Amino acid sequence: MKNPEIFEKTYTHYWQKLNAFSYTMTQDKDLAQNIVQDVFIDLWERKDDLNINAIEPYLFRAVKNQIFKHYQNNRFDKTIMEDKFEDYIIDNFQSIDPEVMDLLYSLLDKLPEKRKEVLLMYKFQDMSIEQIADELGISKQTVKNQISSALKQLREGLKDLAWLAPIIFFKENF
């Protein structure tokens, strides 16, 4: 990264992806841009000391760490950011990198059968709660409870993947 041309190519290639990721986490355009800018400034200033094997995971993790650091310094609860992040993952199953789909399917497979069926109908088939209730012959409240329980269980499982998710979900999307 000591070469200015390589740094510039890296900046050009990753700026938009990192900014989109940062904005998703912060919901603040200016803060998101500042965080990404800080990461690149730090990267340039420390170019002689760093030995980075894979730049993309490094950059996404650096942005995530900067976001958490910002909120920690401003006395916000880091779990709020992690929950937003997990919600994004759950809401964007279709855009997930195929390599990671296996990990997510293993989490889905841990769900009780009926709960998994309801969640898949809701998320993958875009069925409404009413449609699912009619299809399965259960009450709308039961459908809501099953979806809520499934999402809660997936959130717990996704906590282990949270560090990996920025790399996976934003790699192809932006």
Image: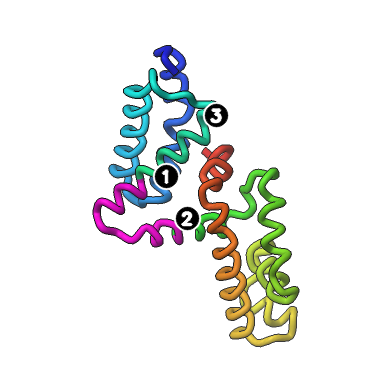
Determine which of the numbered discs, if any, sits on residue 64 in the image.
1
Q: Residue 48: x percent and y percent?
A: 38, 18
Name the residue tied to disc 2: 85
When asked about the image quadrant of residue 92, the answer is bottom right
Q: Nearer the viewer, residue 106 or 113?
A: 106
When asked about the image quadrant of residue 131, the answer is bottom right
Residue depicted at x 56% and y 55%: 160
- Cα distance between the residues tagged 3 and 1: 16 Å
Residue depicted at x 52% and y 52%: 162
In the drawing, does residue 166 fall left or right of residue 64?
right
Residue depicted at x 40% and y 13%: 4
Q: Of the residues under marks 2 and 3, which one precedes in the sequence?
A: 3
- Cα distance between the residues tagged 2 and 1: 10 Å
Residue depicted at x 53% and y 58%: 159
Badge 2 vs badge 1, beta-carbon distance below 8 Å:
no
Vertically, is 142 above or below 6? below
What is the residue that sits farthest to the left in this orientation?
Answer: 74
Name the residue tied to disc 3: 54
Q: Which residues are magenta?
A: 67-83
In the drawing, does residue 66 fall left or right of residue 102?
left
